[in-house]
Image (cartoon, helix red, strand yellow):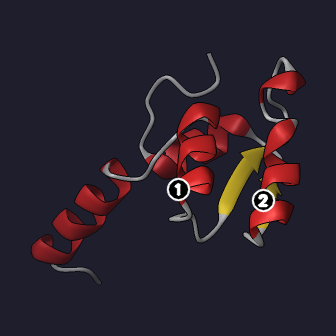
Amino acid sequence: MLSKTHSHYIYVYLRSLPRGANEATKTLNRGVSEIIVLAADTSPLAIVLHLPLLCEDKNVPYVYDPSKTALGRACGVSRAGN
């Protein structure tokens, strides 16, 4: 079980994660990304099509999550899936 201080640190960490295709592109170009998580049901798909190529160029692993709603909830985004 996490103590209140640990949950606070996890919350602060999640709030500071870059979210969205533009932020992902910026962190990849700056060389600070360690992993990129993409939503497989993004629409329009063209928003994220460049990211796998950029990840491969920068040797950054990437993974697809099947649901943008679940991914948004995991990152603390309340409007995910809209």
Question: Which badge, 2 or 1, is on the more N-terminal residue?
Answer: 1
Q: Nearer the viewer, mark 2 or mark 1?
A: 1
Pick the quarter of the image with the C terminus. top right
Label drawn at residue 70:
none
Q: In which quarter of the image is the N terminus?
A: bottom left
Q: Is residue 33 left or right of residue 40?
A: left
Quadrant of residue 68 within the rendered picture:
top right
Looking at the picture, does residue 59 appear above or below residue 11?
A: below
The vertical placement of 59 against 29, above or below, is below
CA gap, disc 2 to disc 1?
12 Å
Give the farthest residue toward the left. Answer: 5
Residue type marked 1: Arg
Apparent side of residue 41 relative to residue 68 in the rendered image (left or right): right
Disc 2 residue crowd, few under 14, some 14–19, many 20+, Cα 10 Å: many
Q: In the image, 27: left or right of 37?
A: left
Residue 13, position as x, y percentages in the image = 31, 62
Question: Residue 46 is drawn in which quadrant?
Answer: top right
Q: How crowded is mark 1: few (under 14 residues within 10 Å), some or many (20 or more)?
A: few
Tell me what residue is drawn at x 12 percent, y 71 percent. 4
Please identify the residue farthest to the bottom as the structure is shown: 1
| Spot occupied by residue 24 in the image (x, y as percentages of width and height) | 60, 45
Residue at image coords 64%, 44% = 70
Residue topped by disc 1: 30
Residue 39 position by quadrant = top right
Residue type, numbered disc 2: Cys
For the residue labelled by badge 2, is the local secondary structure a helix, a strand or a loop? Answer: helix
Residue wearing tag 2: 55
Q: Residue at x 69, y 55 (%)?
A: 37
Q: Disc 1 on helix, strand or loop?
A: helix
Residue at the (83%, 47%) spot, across then down? 66
* In the image, residue 68 above or below residue 33: above
The image shows residue 6, relative to residue 38, as above or below, that is below
